[in-house]
Image (cartoon, grey):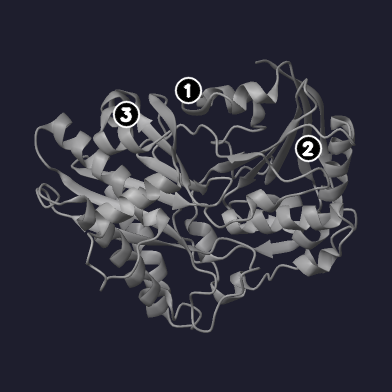
Amino acid sequence: MKVQILTRELVKPLIPTPPNLSNYKISFTDELAPVVNVPSILYYKANQNIKATSMCDILKTSVEKALPNFYPFAGRYEKNSRFIDCSDQGVEFITAQADGQLSVILGLGKKLEVKLLDQLVPCDVQKADEITDPLLHIQVTMFDCGGLALTLCFAHRIGDASTISSFMAGMVAVSRGLSIETFQPSFDVGSFYPRKGLPHWKLNWTDNNVTKRLVFDSEAIQTLRNKARPAGDIGKSKPSRIQLVNAVILQALVSIDSAKYGHSRAAYFMQTMNLREKASPPIPIQSFGNLFGLATVNLEAGEAKDKEYGDYVGMLSDSVKGAVDDYKNMLLQHEDDHRKVIDPFLEANEKLTDPEVNWFIHTSWSRFPYYDADFGWGTPIWASAAALPLKNVSILMDTKDLTGIEAWVYLEETDVPLFEQYPDILALTT
């Protein structure tokens, strides 16, 4: 598949940002976010009632109309001063033409070479945080069949998956003639958590990696649930789909690491979690910015050696419950409560640079409304992540029917054969 860029322009808010909003201060939770552009892709099949070119026009107009309510996306980041210059420099908007059929990509299933999707991503994921870098890139790629792919690639510096999902929902609303006021974000995060000059969460970039896409359908999820919770064990709470899949990936990677080094090394597990509505009082779900925390599990060398699958599920579930308790008072203006948010990220930076620690990062995009994004020609037939030059990282998303989990796992190239042959990965994924 070859993709040709047709147009490239900067789209500005339909209503100019008022001068009093021109200086948007980021929060310390924004400071902690990694330097990365995060891509997500929605795929739409052809619609007999509307041409792909008209879809492009509708999407561009919806961006213009939604931006006044999400005005920081149209600005630029001043990294030395740590604020967003909201002078309406614009969002990069690209239209492109692919010389193939969307059905070819969708039909590949487990055989999909994820790098095939690279041409649908409008930006270099590592080039972020410079004054010339747009904070949001959008690419609309049309296929010969009349279908299209919509890619949103946002700078993690000013938002997380919840933030971009809200923007996408605002785009959908205005494209359907609804009031954008329904999607008015809250910009209070910087007031609650003023910037502190903190270091960002450091990612380990690598060119020697492979992205694997795995689908755990509803039957596989039930199999994992039964394995984690033996019959008759009704006293424990029901593990989530996310914890079930995270646990099988972690168990596989721990096994691979032990095989590589000949012994069980110290392991450090990091799960990101959306903090909206988890604090007391609750942080509004429509809050703009980075509001994610880390739930961590720290195992000493040899400690993971004899653990069963159910132990991994329990550890991950308990770490999330413990983190929720730690974060519940985060809205209070007490330094001790703020440290509970900050310290896990500082510890993570130490672990990520320790050659004796086997670390993993897991993040979830489950329950975000990707499959609700109907701009007037139907909902997406598929929603995906994209290739990232990272290792020991996974992104979990819902399947289209919302009963399974699609896992995007970023691995060192040398780990892929063992990972693919791990019994539960081999037996339970499609």
Amino acid type of disc 2? Phe
Task: Residue at 86% x, 54% y: name it.
Answer: 176
- Residue 420, label in figure: 3
Q: Earlier in the sequence, mark 2 or mark 1?
A: 2
Residue 418 x, y percent position in the rendering: 25, 27
- Label 2: few (<14), some or many (≥20) within 10 Å? many
Amino acid type of disc 3? Glu
Residue 134 x, y percent position in the rendering: 70, 42
Which residue position holds label 2?
93
Q: Nearer the viewer, residue 110 or 156?
A: 110
Which residue position holds label 1?
111
Task: Residue at 19% x, 38% y: name it.
Answer: 255
What is the quadrant of residue 259 in the picture? top left
Q: Earlier in the sequence, mark 1 or mark 3?
A: 1
- Residue 253, label in figure: none
Give the CA distance from mark 2 to mark 1: 30 Å
